[in-house]
Image: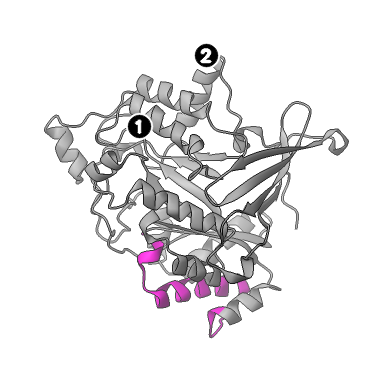
Amino acid sequence: VTVLTRPHPCPGACVFCPEVAGMPKSYLPDEPGAMRAAAYEFDPYGQTAGRVSVMLDIGHPVDKIELLILGATWSSYPWDYQEWFVRRCLDALNQTDSATLAEAQTRNERARHRNVGLVVETRPDCVTASEVVRLRRLGVTKVQLGAQSLDDGILAANRRGHTVAQTREAVRLLRLCGFKIVLHWMPNLLGATPQSDLRDFRSLWEDPGLRPDEIKIYPTALLPGTVLYSLWQEGRYEPYDEPTLVALLAECKSLIPTYCRLNRLMRDIPAPNIVAGVKRSNLRQIVQLEMARTGRTCGCIRCREVRDRAIDPGELTLNRTEYSTRATSEVFVSADAPDGRLAGFARLSLPTANPPIAELDACAVVRELHVYGEALE
């Protein structure tokens, strides 16, 4: 269940964010999620209850709900708004009002619709030791970070307002405190080339300060009303054409390690809003066809998960993939079928530094446990 926060100024002044009245800065009014949020005037209770009702109507089990709170930079909102927003989402799941967040959380432990995961998105420069404690108090389990690039020059040219060092530190703090980590990465930013983008993407896995659990790839979309659009008009920026972008993403996809899940390969922006460059909404499918044509494969979690295919549990084997980070030794334990399909996995973090949360001192942490198959009530 995805809900959007009310419009709020972006802490940075990104060259690719449009100014759209009544919308979070990085969203457009005709995006599906934004349209749903606007229909409920960004009310968290209405959005949550509405989505649960729709999912129930189309046959989904709705006793376990993962909540995604998206929109503007979560950490830049006042604390009382954050607490109220999460409480009202839980009130919708509980189907009753609570006076405090703690009361709503306690009620949800036995509610008809239980929150089994809470996701927010924020900026790397907003993640501090005190912030991760606040996120835990809210019940957050996964954090999406807008890394966008791993080149300080490109970050500065695109007015991102944060540095690569801040991204590394944010990832370190979040991992130490047991959060699941999703990084957003954007090829074709101002100043980038296909060659520099490929080097950048390799750094995600070669740099022990990064190595995310999940990743979203958002190729830069050229939209009217942005600084980037003005630079394009002046001939100072050029979007990649489709063959260039597809070739780049096919190479990137083949580099993703088996412990990471590629969630997205294209932002859900309606094509009429994109002025120039790639507009295909099925870009992932096109990239997969290119990979098949060139004999490459992707080993990411999404490509390997069993989904709706039958599997014999007796044929599964447990495998360990170990890798180091700036804060932990990671053990990715997977249950694999003989043909490589993934039935389930666990992420075990063994800390090599002291976490900001005292209760986690010297503790091994299972950051994620996931078993694939049909959702069970």
Q: Name the main secondary structure of what is drawn in magenta.
A: helix
| Type of the residue with mark 2 | Thr
Residue 341 pos. (x, y %):
71, 32
**Mark 1 burial class by Cα count in 10 Å: few <14, some 14-19, many 20+:** many
Q: Which residue is mark 2?
A: 294
Helix, strand or loop under label 1: loop
Residue 186 pos. (x, y %):
37, 39
Q: How is the image coloured?
A: one colour
Q: Quadrant of residue 23?
A: bottom left
| Type of the residue with mark 1 | Lys
Q: Is residue 333 magenta?
A: no
Q: Residue furthest right?
A: 314
Q: Which residue is mark 1?
A: 279
Helix, strand or loop under label 2: loop
Q: Is residue 80 magenta?
A: yes
Asked whether 280 or 319 is in front, the reply is 319
Which mark lies nearer to you, 1 or 2?
A: 2
Residue 67 appears in the picture as rendered = yes
Asked whether 338 or 29 is in front, the reply is 338
Q: Residue at x 53, y 51 (%)?
A: 181
Residue 298 pos. (x, y %):
58, 27
Residue 188 pos. (x, y %):
32, 33
The answer to whether residue 91 is left or right of residue 184 is right
Q: Quadrant of the C terminus?
A: bottom right
Asked whether 365 or 4 is in front, the reply is 365
Residue 123 appears in the picture as rendered = no
Q: Residue at x 29, y 31 (%)?
A: 192
Above or below residue 375? Residue 131 is below
What residue span does the magenta drawing correspond to?
73-101
Above or below residue 252? Residue 89 is below
